[in-house]
Image (cartoon, rainbow, N blue to C red):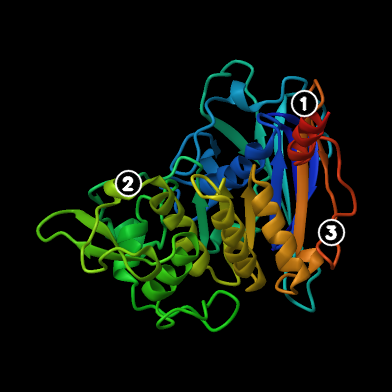
Amino acid sequence: MITQLTLVNFKAFRRLELPMGPLTLLTGLNSSGKSSVLQALALLRQSFGPDRSTSPEEGLLLNGELVEVGTARDVLHDDFGSADDLLATDAPVVGFVVDDEVDDEFDDGNVGRFIARYDLQQPDEDVMEAYDFPGWRGFLSLPFQYLHADRITPAVTYPRSRQVAIDRGFLGVRGEHTVNYLRYNAEREVPDGPLRHPNATSPQLLDQTVAWMQELCPGVNLQATAIEGTDFVRLSYGFGGTAGINATRRRRPTNVGFGLTYALPIVVACLTTTPESLILLENPEAHLHPKGQTRMAALISAAAATGAQLVVETHSDHVLNGVRLAVKRGDLRPDDAVIHFFRGNGSGAEVISPRVDEDGMLAQWPEGFFDEWENSLDQLLD
């Protein structure tokens, strides 16, 4: 479990020390640095994790399967400062420090330090020379998912890759391998606990996925099937019950709308998490109605309650309130929900971290933090 992430000279931050918990919500204005936190974790995973095709000693890989951030010039903070505490060098460096809590009575935790040198002669290279790479592995070798805001859209077919979806258990950064993963693991059971939906017809993954998807669209069901003789799989939806449509007729995702297909990778990622997992999610609320956004927050909170760690970027007050409700109901401990509000300060970004109390209330409500509804109401009543 990552307890703190420190970024040095990375993108919007000259230095950022960010506490983290089982569920960390990143909120705030556009271009204020939220995505940089997710990108930093993804950069470390794609550079030093088990899926890198070349040796990790070759450096920090800025463009890869998980994230593409451009060149060294794009990564180095404009007003970069000294990083003598990380590496004694006159050259500009980008640094990442990961404090990792270890669940061991004999070990107080580990710290991973990753330093990349900015080459003044080659600022447009997309690999930065890495220094001081320790033997510490931390989250780098544990189960991992990263779902971008730009996820799969409704389509007739989706890829069938055994190596990615089945051997690695990776859904793809756009969730493009979700349908194949679900097809192959349909009978895998969701362990008894917070994630298991009480109204599902069985504990199997497909039935659990359907039950949670019905929280977003009542009456929906889905099928994931292989297309014989091809490298593709097919997703189809059915409707019945409260939806009031004939359940025997299957419908293509292209005839259903964006919301369900966009949400499907998030649901599957949460349902298949383990206590060791790290899941990075961008805008899980996208294309969902307000109630669906709140229920999505309940699912994310349930995943965190199992012992997994989720880092979620969101612009939705419904997601925020869904997490607060989970705390109030006792589904998630107050200290397990860490909220950070990012806002620009002219030269970079600052972070304010409202604390969640046991009753779900926030200890502080900074200006600009999900207050637009009140601001608009004041103008309407003026």
What's under tag 3, amino acid-wise? Met
Q: How would you rate the neighbour count of disc 2 (Cα within 10 Å): few for under 14, some for 14-19, many for 20 or more? A: some
> Label 3 belongs to which residue?
361
* Closer to the eye: label 1 or 3: 3
Left or right, 191 with respect to 333, comes to left
Residue at position x 55%, y 74% from top? 195
Tag 1 secondary structure: loop
Residue 95: x %, y % from top left: 71, 38
Image vertical order of residue 205 relative to residue 335, above or below: below
> Label 2 belongs to which residue?
154
What's under tag 2, amino acid-wise? Pro
Can residue 319 be seen from the camera position used here? Answer: yes
- Seen from the viewer's position, the closer of residues 83 and 38 is 38
Tag 2 secondary structure: loop
Q: How would you rate the neighbour count of disc 1 (Cα within 10 Å): few for under 14, some for 14-19, many for 20 or more? A: some
Of labels 2 and 1, earlier in sequence is: 2
Residue at position x 76%, y 67% from top? 327
What's under tag 1, amino acid-wise? Gly
To which quarter of the image does residue 1 belong? bottom right
Instruction: List the single residue furthest toward the right.
Output: 363
> Label 1 belongs to which residue?
348
Left or right, 118 with respect to 157, comes to right
Q: How would you rate the neighbour count of disc 3 (Cα within 10 Å): few for under 14, some for 14-19, many for 20 or more? A: some
